[in-house]
Amino acid sequence: MKKIFSIMAVAGALMMTSCDKWLDVNDNPNIPNTKVPTVDLRLPSIIARFAEAYESGGTRAAIISQQLAGTTVNNWALSRWNISTAAVNWPYQPWYIYTANNIPDLIEKGEATGANHYIGAGKVIWAWGFAAFSDMYGMLPYEEAFQGGLMTPKYDQGDLIYDKCLAELDEAISYLQMGQDAAAPALSVGDYLFQGDTKKWIALANGIKARMLNHLSKTDKFKAADVLALLEKAPKTASESALYQYQDRIVSTRPETESLQFQNNSSNRLTKLYIDYVLGNYTGAPTGANNMEDPRADLLIPRFVASGLRTPGVDMSQIPEAGFASSITTYAALRPTASVSTGSAYVAPGAKGLLLTSSEMHFIKAEVLFNQNNKAGALQAYKDGIKDHMEILGVPAANITSYLASTSVAQSASALTLSQIMIQKYIALSYSPEVFNDVRRLEYCTDASGKYNESVGIYKGLKRPGAVFTIALPSEDMWPRRFTVASYSINYNYEQVIKADPDAADATYTAKRIWWDVKK
């Protein structure tokens, strides 16, 4: 019943508002309704469900961006770049039904009780989610998504959603800067992300804005100065990062509290590309007499417990259409198990979800400064990005210092390349939706013709899969550019989908660029 309810809710307006009173009777206190829960009871679930939706999008982005290879039907389809509705439905549902649907009630209750900090946090998550999911899908119901009684909301394009979300973030900051009514619960009571620290919420809002504006790098709307100004107000240290702490099985036996990546990566395996990036085995990687293995390697790349050997990676350029399921034991599991695999730090049951980090902010700064020809500033920001990611993963300080001084890291501003910056960002944003945003925005590893060219491309070695789904991507210059429309809307709101974009019915729709992913 729950599943049917959820699907119908998404299909018919992606909303669940209170019914209008058509009988003049008192509310039954034994029946839950949307008006009773207080803001401090609402926010924890909204944060948790947002993390689920966002990180679910991240797992799928990681597969498309060749960090991960999957063996299940849906995940192998994504590995082939067959971005089917079945493969990308789930991020859509927890966002609309379990997260965004509840934020208007949080804000309404906050306004009634003077809980301004809760209103601010709710607006941050609202804008964050809609911006992120518009990046994934290209278009979404936004303006009509939660209008009571409307069962077929129109779809809005990402540029409109961005404008609305940037304004929403500005409002969020204003509310977070206000005081609260004396009777309103302190933000710390319901805030599982920053324990009530409004300064960190404000930094997060500015970080989201910086991320969004940096996505515009190929458009005439991009303004480097605006991005750099926002970065000055965004998270600058690992401790300011938005990290969602999941619970280990030792703490809780409830599976819904476990790491989202633990739940999503039971059968996925690392790719050769990802391992090569971590170990610096790619064209143009920094090198020299003082090379040192990345101290994150054993945190990110599993070893077989019995042999102590590190897993090989799945070579996506060679795997045939049948996949690699028959040889999956060749590759160590991402989930850590005492007798089989050391696993990945991201896939432990009690791992953190890296939602927005200071590391990402540093890499955005490095990219912007590099493109302004400020190579010295870019070099420092590149190193800061590596350092902060290592700190978040718990790498000992002495190891961080040694690695940053080694020739495995660029030491000369004149030798630093954009490829080195972005590949380090690719590592720091493991299993994040931002990986897919970046590989699209930086044109994978292609030249001006759109075909793979390692001599000029950014993501060295990121090739079209050997088993590429040629129905969707029939030519060598075609690469994934968006998620397909979720099946809920195809099944129940098809007219509005096609009205918003007639190309949504085409087999090659996932190769169509979204609004900021313009061809230069």
Image (cartoon, rainbow, N blue to C red):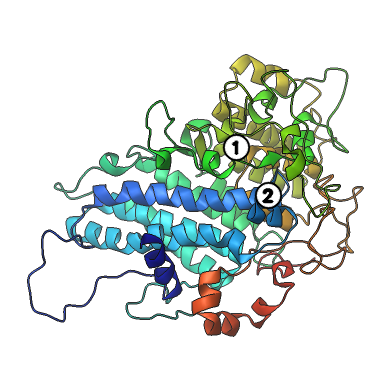
| In-image side of 222 versus 254 (left or right) | right
**Residue appearing at x 56%, y 79% in the figure:** 497
Along the line of sight, the residue nearer the viewer: 396 or 200: 396
The quarter of the rendered structure image containing the C terminus is bottom right
Is residue 76 depicted above or below 325 in this figure?
below
Give the quarter of the image for residue 510: bottom right
Dot 1: what SS? helix
Along the line of sight, the residue nearer the viewer: 376 or 483: 483
The image position of residue 338, as x and y in percent, is: 57, 21
| In-image side of 462 versus 37 (left or right) | right
The image position of residue 384, as x and y in percent, is: 64, 32
| In-image side of 409 versus 123 (left or right) | right
Q: Which residue is mark 1?
A: 359
Of the image marks 2 and 1, the number of the one nearer the N terminus: 2
Residue type, numbered disc 1 = Ser
Is residue 327 depicted above or below 167 in this figure?
above
Give the quarter of the image for residue 248: top left
Residue type, numbered disc 2 = Ile
Q: Which residue is mark 2?
A: 63
Which residue occupies the extreme front position in the image? Answer: 326
The image position of residue 72, as x and y in percent, is: 65, 50
The quarter of the rendered structure image containing the N terminus is bottom left
